[in-house]
Image: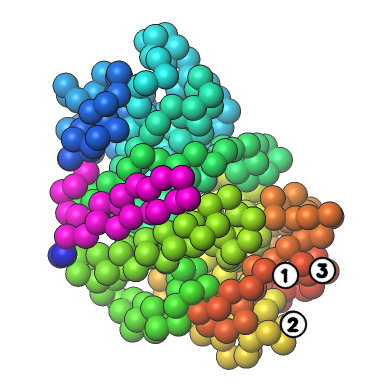
Amino acid sequence: MSVDALTVALATRSYSLDVRPGVARSWPAATAVRQASARVVVTNRTIAALYPELVAGTQCNLRIELEDGERYKTADSVDVIHSALLRARCDRKCIIVAVGGGVVGDTAGFAAATYMRGIPFIQVPTTLLAQVDSSIGGKTAINHPLGKNMIGAFHQPSAVFIDPLLLNTLPDAELSAGFAEIIKHALIRDAAYLDWLEANSAGLLARDPELLTHAIRRSCEIKAAIVEADEFETGERALLNLGHTFGHALEAVLGFGTWLHGQAVGCGLVLATDMSARLGLIDSAAVARVQRIVSAFRLPVRVPAQASTSALVDAMLLDKKNEGGRVRFILLEAIGRGVIRPESVELAAQVIDAHR
Ligand SMILES: NC(=O)c1ccc[n+]([C@@H]2O[C@H](COP(=O)([O-])OP(=O)(O)OC[C@H]3O[C@@H](n4cnc5c(N)ncnc54)[C@H](O)[C@@H]3O)[C@@H](O)[C@H]2O)c1
Ligand SMILES: O=C(O)C(=O)C[C@@H](O)[C@H](O)[C@H](O)COP(=O)(O)O
Ligand SMILES: [Zn+2]
């Protein structure tokens, strides 16, 4: 496996994405960590049991273990973090180190964004999904009972340590979930990457280290470039939401944690491609192809019966991309080329019904 450092170069500052086997252990050496008044590791019980050396020891002044799961990506968990920081008298120079998947990263990141109006944090992502997507770009959020990621802030990490070796312990379903975001990156930006993913699905699912490292690197490059161009999602960053208008609605309607985020996004990618075909933007052969690829990575492609179409449409009406009462969808003009368009929810409802 190769050694790679990528950079996210924002208008105001830059930070590195260090992609390397074993790099997770070097988070205490990061400049931001060395300069901090105290180091607060936020993780969950599963990670703390699997990787005690990453989340304890002399490098860590305080460790906060959250409950594991999407249903704990809540205001209560943020309160647990804030209360622990206050009890330990942490000042504005302390740093939060998020060691975990997207749930830990989003929750700890939002706690960092809001504690004393903002303290620094770094990301040590431990799932494939977090390594290719959620640890990069500074979107932090918690869920509200009425909608996904409804309460949040843009707060960029000071550094990201991406260690592919941590994926050895990841359950198969969680690995597959990460591929939903990877397929998304290919669909919006890089047709050749999709060809490569299609040709290498078996090796990637078998966790071939060379293939996995290539996918992590390519996805990080795509996400970093989009975030650099549009940090606060005033334009093209919304492309990273391909599959999410449907996906977030599925997560909320099924109940947070019933489907993994990646599973909901996988199904959402098929629905968004079908919607694009119905609008004449893309060939209908693309729908069958995207469905085949999503299935090959062991992700769902059918909308479950318990999520009614009307409930899904109601959830889509709450999407953060909506403007002036119009639902904005991310669609495909071609494989490798995403586009953002307001469209009717009636068409979205037809698409949902066609994929029961
Ligand atoms: N901020 C963003 O830009 C962004 C992007 C994509 C997704 N997200 C969010 O990320 C969340 C999903 O993240 P996720 O897929 O990482 O789920 P997750 O954080 O729930 O982690 C998945 C499961 O794997 C376990 N786990 C983590 N690392 C492990 C390891 N190395 N070995 C064994 N088990 C491990 C976790 O304890 C958990 O049970 C969603 O809430 C989603 O909304 C945010
Ligand atoms: O970074 C982004 O921008 C994304 O949209 C990445 C998505 O994969 C991620 O799930 C994100 O949290 C969704 O953002 P939201 O604004 O729709 O809540
Ligand atoms: Zn996502």
Disc 1: which residue: 341
Which label is found at residue 218? none
The yes-or-no answer for disc 3 within 8 Å of ligand 2 is: no
The yes-or-no answer for disc 1 within 8 Å of ligand 2 is: no
Disc 3: which residue: 344
Which label is found at residue 279? 2
Q: Which residues are magenta?
A: 3-24
Quadrant in which residue 353 is drawn: bottom right
Q: Secondary structure at mark 1?
A: strand
Residue 258, relative to residue 329: is it above or below? above
Q: Residues within 10 Å of mark 1 (few under 14, many from 20)?
A: few
Q: Which amino acid type corresponds to the residue marked 2 in the rendered image?
A: Leu
Quadrant in which residue 186 is drawn: bottom left
Q: Are marks 3 and 1 in contact (CB under 8 Å)?
A: no
Q: Which amino acid type corresponds to the residue marked 3 in the rendered image?
A: Ser
Asked whether, in this view, residue 59 is left or right of residue 244, the answer is left
Q: Residues within 10 Å of mark 3 (few under 14, many from 20)?
A: few
Picture coordinates of residue 303, whole percent (x, y): 64, 65
Q: Are marks 3 and 2 in contact (CB under 8 Å)?
A: no
Residue 63, relative to residue 188: is it above or below? above
Q: Residue at x 37, y 64 (%)?
A: 221
Asked if residue 234 can be seen in this view, the reply is: yes
Q: In the image as oriented, which residue stretches furthest toward the front? A: 12
Residue 4 covered by magenta stretch: yes
Residue 240 covered by magenta stretch: no
